[in-house]
Image (cartoon, helix red, strand yellow):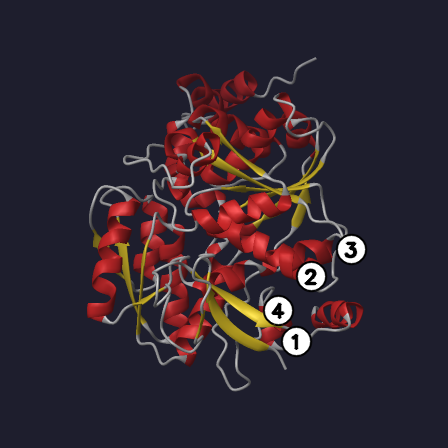
Amino acid sequence: MAVTYLQCIEEACARRQDPRKKMHQCAWCGGLLEVKYEFGISDPAALRSTWHQRRLSGEPIDRSGVWRFRELLPFIGQDDRVISLSEGSTPLVGTRRAGWWAGPVHLTIKHQGINPTGSFKDLGMTACMTRAASLGVRMVACASTGNTSSSMAAYAGRAGMKAVLFVPYRQISAAKLAQALDFGAVVIEIGDTFDEAFQLLRQVATEMDFYLVNSINPFRIEGQKTIVAEMMEQRAWRPPDYIVVPGGNLGNASAIGKGLRELKEMGFIEKVPKVVVIQAAGAAPFFRTLQAGSQDLIPVEKPDTEATAIRIGRPANWKKARRVLEWTGGFCESVTDEEIFQGKAALAEDGVGCEPASAATVAGIRKLVRAGKIERHADIIAVLTGHQLKDTDYVIRHRSAAEQSRQRLRVDANMDALRKALESVLIVPA
């Protein structure tokens, strides 16, 4: 049977702590915590077979792409209620046109927008909420630029908990706000940035007995790490050269690195892909920190990007993410909003839609290939973190008048006008 404990990530501390306590930071030094296990897994081949067989199961827990790999999440007790919406099990999609545009590279998309609330956050939220339920939590809270909020609200509703959401005033897409409201969350619009909202939430959380479900909660990382097991299984356990993710609060990069390390240490994979983080140029504190070689985070006080999901100036998980890049030999890059838009357009030509932050991955790959940091024809998985419908205003804003006139026509209700309109826009190039 596996042994579970929490451990401070700060090397000068590294103290073990009780995983049954409601804590998200070290009781001694205030550092972030990580869930650690003594797994006791001795036969990876047998477990791979078990995971594969569960895909044929009708049991609700096996329909989840997170809990199907529950041996990687042994913090759950035998009698604990699993809070699940059948998350995970998202596709790997080949993208020939986008891959050619970005490299050329062999580009495969892991599309997390297919999850129940439309983003990768659901992978972490099912684990985090399952832990919360086992602790008897009644109120959960998060600060969010959008995706965490809708995911928390949905899973809180599933668990019968009250959800309280802190968002920066008018800095969240209408679609994401609507999701949170639809699931019954209380929305507190406060501050001008995610970082301000998050700081205020952390100050009031203990007083109000909120259970924080942002990615500083180490059990969020546990759910999100299962994306790696699913990726590897979908590729017959042959890792790619690179895994590329957008970088906001950096929980995703941290989770992917943790998943890779555990699979490598237990013998599920032999090769470790390089993890690459792409940030928006106007919200790139991690990129700036690494470029400067600084041991302390260089924050961005007023992050500015249309990719709202990664508009974060003080990423909480930056130390975990830096450790992942160092271990995998990966790196970080930044891209402009215009480059993100071009990446989104390239994906759309392959029939792949996503929110703007997701497209930063493809834009970053293109930039890195041209800089010689990623080799041409490399085998790459790009993680798209959110659904196309998460920010529909972005799509409309970026359509020029000429594009609008070609794609969106107002036609009088008679056949002559209809024929004329169709002939004007449906000319097939010779």
Kindly identify which residue carries mark 1. 58
Image quadrant holding the N terminus, namely: bottom right
Relative to 3, is 179 on the left or the right? left
Q: CA distance from mark 1 to mark 4?
A: 21 Å
> Which mark lies nearer to you, 4 or 3?
4
> Which mark lies nearer to you, 1 or 4?
4
Q: Do tag 2 and tag 3 residues touch (Cβ < 8 Å)?
A: no
Q: CA distance from mark 1 to mark 3?
A: 23 Å
Residue 261 x, y percent position in the rendering: 63, 57
Secondary structure under tag 3 reads loop
Image quadrant holding the C terminus, namely: top right
36 or 404: which is nearer to us? 36
Type of the residue with mark 1: Gly
| The quarter of the displayed image where residue 383 is located | top right
Kindly identify which residue carries mark 2. 265
Residue 37 x, y percent position in the rendering: 58, 71
Label whose residue precedes the other's in the sequence (4 or 3)? 4
| The quarter of the displayed image where residue 18 is located | bottom left
> Which mark lies nearer to you, 1 or 2?
2
Residue drawn at (42%, 41%) of the image: 295
Secondary structure under tag 1 reads loop
Kindly identify which residue carries mark 4. 72
Badge number at residue 236: 3
Label whose residue precedes the other's in the sequence (2 or 3)? 3
Residue drawn at (44%, 57%) of the image: 10
